[in-house]
Amino acid sequence: MLAVLLGLGVWQLHRLAWKRQLLAEIAAAEQAPPVPLPAHPSPFRKVAVSGQLRGDARALYGAEVRDGRSGPVLGGQLLVPLVRSGALPVIADLGWVPADRRDTVTLPAGDVTIAGYLRPAEHPGLFSATDNPRARLFYTLDPAAVGAALGFPAVAPFTLVALGAPPPAGLPDPARALPRPPNDHLQYALTWFGLAAVLLGVFAAHVRKVFRP
């Protein structure tokens, strides 16, 4: 049991080093300028993608309540296809909008360039909320399912999440930073090493009791 506890603690220390390196790479990517979309992009890459937003095809992802002037407002992330010349359309997450403003928020016309990061496709789990493609409401960010509901049977296998400040009108409200995974590995390592120390203490007390004259 001591070997198992120490092994788990050492494993968490290795995970801690890996997570710190990952967070450093995310921070560096966040400070760097976006690059043109490569042919085979990696997840969470900061890129700039050009095309035309199909404002007539909109969907809402997720459910998030924010404080409004008159009280709490239910909304979600506005998803719109970004149509590119000679390439598959990209589902763009332009930012948070109130649910009742999904179809009325003004979007830029003509050619636009959106800077953001690439979010890999998700797949519904056992306890995921059920999507409503007919109402264009989604709770799993699967670009293929969103594209099909919006009339685009073939889209890029990732979502472009817009980064930056909101437009003058305030909506959609894009993400401000790249996502960062939690880093609790040091706490886990201390927990396993602490249990190992407790185990040694219990064993030492048992040995003293057994061999006490």
Image: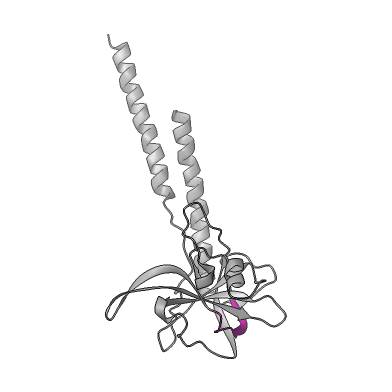
- Look at 41% across and 68% down and name the residue there: 63
- Look at 50% across and 55% down and name the residue there: 19
Q: Could you tell me what secondary structure mostly forms the magenta stretch? A: strand
Q: In the image, residue 32 lies at what x, y percent?
A: 54, 74
Which residue ends up furthest to the front in the rendered image? 134
Task: Check if residue 55 falls in the magenta segment.
Answer: yes
Residue 45 seen by the camera: no
Asked if residue 27 lies left or right of residue 43, the reply is left
Who is closer to the viewer here, 166 or 185?
Answer: 166
Q: Which residues are magenta?
A: 48-57
Q: In the image, residue 88 lies at what x, y percent?
A: 68, 75
Residue 26 seen by the camera: yes
Is 163 situated above or below 107? Answer: above
- Look at 46% across and 62% down and name the residue there: 180
Specify the quadrant that holds the N terminus: top left
Who is closer to the viewer here, 120 or 139?
Answer: 139
Which residue ends up furthest to the top in the rendered image? 213
Specify the quadrant that holds the C terminus: top left
Q: How is the image coloured?
A: one colour
Task: Check if residue 18 falls in the magenta segment.
Answer: no
Q: In the image, residue 54 lies at what x, y percent?
A: 58, 83
